[in-house]
Image (cartoon, helix red, strand yellow):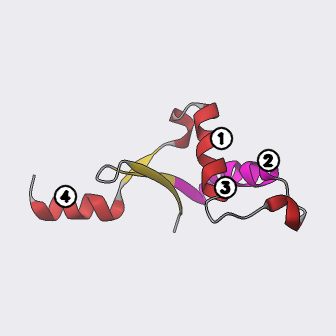
Amino acid sequence: MSHNKLTDQHEEGLEIPYDQINIDTLRRMIQEFVTRDGADWADSGCALEDKVEQVLRQLKNKKVKVVFDPISQTANFVACC
């Protein structure tokens, strides 16, 4: 594999179909994602579970996708264009 190919893969990552991720694992991933900045959703009148459901809807509506970075071995939620 060429260095450029590896760099391109690192920048873009690999899209993982959300429906192929165990639902409990997916929910934990979403919980980590929505609390990543340390926000306390209860303070804003929005429960954590509401935010999780919102991200799940965005996944189902193809507004967000799960991207895995094989270099850092991390996954993230990315807005679809």
Range drawn in magenta: 48-65
Q: Along the horizontal axis of the image, is 70 left or right of 7?
A: right
Disc 1 from disc 3: Cα separation: 13 Å
Please give the label number shown on residue 49: 2
Please give the label number shown on residue 27: 1
Please give the label number shown on residue 6: 4
Mark 3 burial class by Cα count in 10 Å: few <14, some 14-19, many 20+: some
Magenta-drawn stretch, dominant element (helix, strand or loop): helix
Mark 1 burial class by Cα count in 10 Å: few <14, some 14-19, many 20+: some
Helix, strand or loop for disc 4: helix
Give the image location of residue 24, x and y in percent.
64, 32
Q: Residue at x 79, y 47 (%)?
A: 49
Relative to the observer, which residue lies in front, 5 or 37?
A: 37
Disc 1 from disc 4: Cα separation: 30 Å
Give the number of the mark in front: 2 or 4.
2
Give the image location of residue 59, x and y in percent.
62, 51
Disc 2 from disc 4: Cα separation: 37 Å
Question: Tag 4: residue type?
Answer: Leu
Relative to the observer, which residue lies in front, 27 or 62?
A: 27
| Residue 54 counted in the magenta span | yes
